[in-house]
Image (cartoon, rainbow, N blue to C red):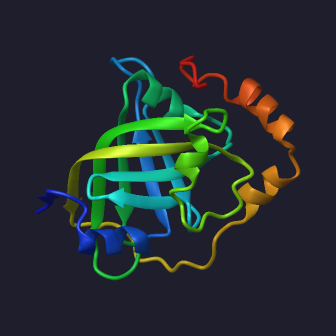
């Protein structure tokens, strides 16, 4: 049976930090539109800012559903799964916001990450005010071994200039798949 926790305490913090992968889920308001679930990884891109606050770096990618959904309604869930050791699934439900690379507050948000990888292609910092912390058994989650980080996201954007990334956001990240504005 799952348990609800009052906050992200030391034990839960240790569990979160140990996971090389987490999932982000958002959805637009109303009954129409697509629910989005995105895997996230790379060491140094996730920070716990307090017992009810976390953040992660959002890199340029093929879509920008999370940012569009957060602008629409703010709802977000982060899920961490134990792929080794004891089975466990931890969910952080809350309200999220994004600060884009073009906004004045971006540098302050970026400074909250003590050891980020290359930040050239970061398009936003996503911050989540956590309202509910809960776990469940994770008995059906497979045991898997972590081999290495993938470098492809960073290297694929390393050849793009800052101006190229502006064009990328304007053309490939202007709207969600449901037509919601992103930036």
In the displayed structure, 51 sits above or below 143; it is: above
Judge by depth and name the residue closer to the eye, 68 or 8. Answer: 8
State the image quarter where residue 31 is shown: top left
Number of marks in the image? Answer: 0
Report if residue 34 is visible in the image. no
Left or right of residue 86: residue 176? right
Left or right of residue 156: residue 40? left
Judge by depth and name the residue closer to the eye, 21 or 181. Answer: 181
State the image quarter where residue 172 is shown: top right
Residue at (14%, 56%) from the top-left corner? 6
The quadrant the C terminus occupies is top right
Residue at (49%, 43%) from the top-left corner? 126
Residue at (32%, 44%) from the top-left corner? 129
Task: List x then y, in percent, for residue 62.
Answer: 68, 39
Residue at (54%, 45%) from the top-left corner? 125
Report if residue 149 is visible in the image. yes
The quadrant the N terminus occupies is bottom left
Task: List x then y, in percent, for residue 124.
Answer: 59, 41
Task: List x then y, in percent, for residue 96.
Answer: 39, 38
State the image quarter where residue 106 is shown: top right
Task: List x then y, in percent, for residue 168.
Answer: 77, 33
């Amino acid at each position: 049976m799952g348990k609800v926790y009052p906050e992200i305490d030391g034990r839960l913090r240790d569990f979160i930090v140990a996971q090389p992968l987490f999932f982000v889920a958002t959805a637009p308001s109303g009954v129409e539109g697509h629910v989005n679930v995105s895997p996230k990884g790379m060491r140094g891109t996730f920070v716990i800012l307090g017992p009810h606050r976390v953040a992660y770096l959002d890199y340029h990618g093929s879509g920008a559903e999370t940012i569009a959904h957060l602008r629409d309604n703010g709802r977000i869930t982060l899920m961490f799964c134990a792929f080794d050791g004891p089975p466990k699934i931890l969910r952080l439900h809350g309200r999220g916001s994004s600060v884009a690379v073009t906004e004045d507050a971006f540098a302050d948000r970026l400074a909250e990450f003590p050891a980020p990888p290359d930040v050239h292609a970061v398009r936003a910092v996503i911050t989540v005010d956590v309202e509910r912390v809960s776990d469940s058994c994770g008995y059906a989650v497979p045991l898997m071994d972590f081999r290495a980080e993938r470098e492809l996201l960073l290297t694929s954007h390393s050849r793009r200039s800052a101006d190229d990334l502006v064009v990328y956001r304007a053309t490939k990240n202007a709207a969600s798949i449901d037509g919601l504005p992103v930036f």
